[in-house]
Image: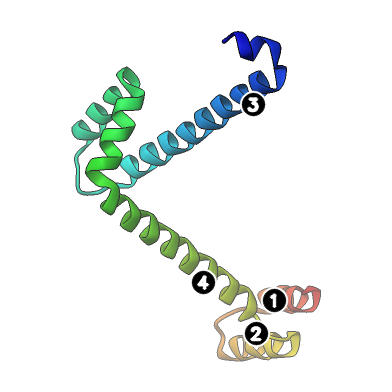
Amino acid sequence: MAIASSYPFIEVFWTMLIFFGFVIWLWILFGVIADLFRRHDVGGFTKVLWIIFLIIAPFLGVFIYLIAYHTGMAERTAKHQAAAQEQLDDYVRSLGAKGDPAEQIAKAKALLDAGTIDQAEFEQMKQKALAS
């Protein structure tokens, strides 16, 4: 390490490398914990044991989990992302399905004529359609 003390750039580089490795390890640790809680094929007791193992031996626990469950981890993550995308698509469709104000007012008028809503509710729906 006599070289490192005479060359501060090497010390900075080494510190950055260690910091980068630590951040990557934290990222993997949080990914493992998220996957552990996303799993439905193991019970709560097994999850608690894994968490205890991750606390007691964090590096070893993460590496063993990755070796043992890497395939299932990828599948669960892909499934979770697909569900999130589907939820976003449904939300966007619900926003886009409102149509133009004239169409909304016509639907509200049909509900009023059918007796499903009263005049106050019709006015409220009309104002809401005109505001958007």
Q: Disc 2 or disc 4, which is closer to the eye?
A: 4
Which amino acid is tagged 2?
Answer: Ala
Query: Which residue is label 1 attached to?
Result: 125
Query: Which residue is label 4 attached to?
Result: 90
> In front here: 70 or 105?
70
Horizontal arrangement in the rendering, residue 5 relative to residue 30 (left or right) = right
- Specify few, some or many for label 1: CA neighbours under 10 Å numbering under 14, 14-19, or 20 or more: some
Location of residue 126 with respect to 109 vertically, above or below: above
Query: Which residue is label 2 attached to?
Result: 108
Q: What whole-number distance in Å separates the C-alpha atoms at marks 1 and 3?
A: 64 Å
Q: Quadrant of residue 28?
A: top left
**Secondary structure of the residue carrying numbered label 4:** helix
Q: Disc 2 or disc 3, which is closer to the eye?
A: 3
Horizontal arrangement in the rendering, residue 56 relative to residue 124 (left or right) = left
Chain-order first, disc 2 or disc 4: 4
Location of residue 15 with respect to 122 vertically, above or below: above
Q: What whole-number distance in Å separates the C-alpha atoms at marks 1 and 4?
A: 23 Å
> In front here: 55 or 1?
1
**Secondary structure of the residue carrying numbered label 3:** helix
